[in-house]
Amino acid sequence: MIASPSAPTADRAVTERLNLLDLAPDDALGVLAGFMAESGEAGYRAAQVYARVWARPVGSFDEMTELPKALRLRLAERFDLPRLTLQTRQASTDGTQKFLFSLRDGQSIETVAIPEGNRLTLCISSQAGCALQCAFCATGAMGFQRNLTPSEIAGQVRELRLLDPPLLATNIVFMGMGEPLMNWKAVDVVLTLLNDPRALGIGARHITVSTVGVLPGIEALAARREQFRLAISIHAPSDALRRTLMPVNVKYPLADVIRAAAAFDRRVTFEYVMLEGVNDQPEHAAQLAQLARDCRAFVNLIPLHPGGALGFTPTPGARIAAFARAMRDRGVEVAVRKSRGLDIAAACGQLRTERLGRRLPVRPEDHEHIDVG
């Protein structure tokens, strides 16, 4: 397991308080129960406080007005409920909203809210920047800055619950900035926070972790008993092509990724960004269909968002439709993802780059050992 990233600090007073948002529910309730006993308070107060942390959140202990004033003051002295600062909020004509949050150390991350009927899907970030440098990804172009803490990842969902009116997620996808399985220790806690009914209470089958194919992380996710979903960013159906688009393919070759997907005992989705003249030819459809059949995967074909193109050209819609038909003809279930937020900076990493410019990346090893082994 990796070491948890050090929480960014604003001042000494904050670092001396325990961040309740970084703790899994059992741990947080245990700490609160001990605090209540130490303070001579009734035991039920621990659950009462915790209900206002995630399920019915408030911005601070002072807003927990059902508690005595003296208890609120003691809680604020002992514990921290850090907020993410909303820096920019954009709304698309199609209902998609994008949020840029700033963190205590000056880093910024993005969250996207996508409405569809009675569902609201949040696309959340797990790292500030990304070390993987996929050729077509705006986040990869900005480089890696650091891992996010559990409070910074799950806090994106919490912050949208704190809006007036609140945005209540029905679905979560780890498809924002960063590679979640290279920050497994934090993501592991976040999955519990998202799913546990004492915290955010979102069904496991409505939570999808997306990865480029970090094999130890796929194994760690598979070992959890909950039915979390796995999405794998394939983007090319052969090692030779995938290496040109995704340098991580050198460490985790496509054949190994497909074997791990086949061993995953829940539904797997392939994510496949369509790049004109690169990965959208008939032979690519045939190769991708074979990979999907090998592990019974569902395939999402994704039109390239022009804001994150980085020199690539989106495949025309007619060719995407033909590509999808060719895969269906081979017995593969396929969907073409609807492009959302085309009138705002909705490509992953685009809004952060537009607002902050590019920053010098740090090498992942300068922050910590990023692995899950």
Image: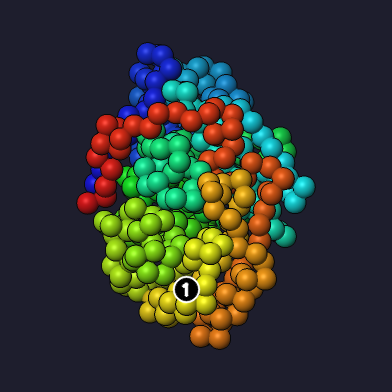
Is 62 or 81 nearer to us in this picture?
81
- Amino acid, disc 1: His
Colour logic: rainbow
State the count of labels: 1
The residue positioned farthest toward the right in the image shown: 93
The residue positioned farthest toward the top in the image shown: 12
Q: In which quarter of the image is residue 333?
A: bottom right
Q: Quadrant of residue 100?
A: top right
Q: Which percent across, then down, holds residue 283? A: 47, 77
Q: Can residue 301 be seen in this view?
A: yes
The residue positioned farthest toward the left in the image shown: 373
Is 105 or 136 nearer to us in this picture?
136
Is 365 or 279 nearer to us in this picture?
279
Q: Is mark 1 on a helix, strand or loop?
A: helix
Residue highlighted by disc 1: 284
Q: Is residue 141 above or below residue 170?
A: above
Q: Which percent across, then down, holds residue 272? A: 50, 64
Q: Which residue is drawn at 34% across and 32% down?
A: 362
Q: Is residue 234 rendered to the left or right of residue 372? A: right
Q: Is residue 57 visible?
A: no
Q: Which percent across, then down, holds residue 96? A: 69, 48
Q: Which residue is drawn at 28% across and 67% down?
A: 256
Q: Which percent across, then down, holds residue 12? A: 37, 13
Q: Residue at x 38, y 32 (%)?
A: 361
Q: Quadrant of residue 363?
A: top left
Q: Which residue is drawn at 60% across and 63% down?
A: 315
Q: How crowded is mark 1: few (under 14 residues within 10 Å), some or many (20 or more)?
A: some
Q: In this view, does 315 lie above or below 368?
A: below
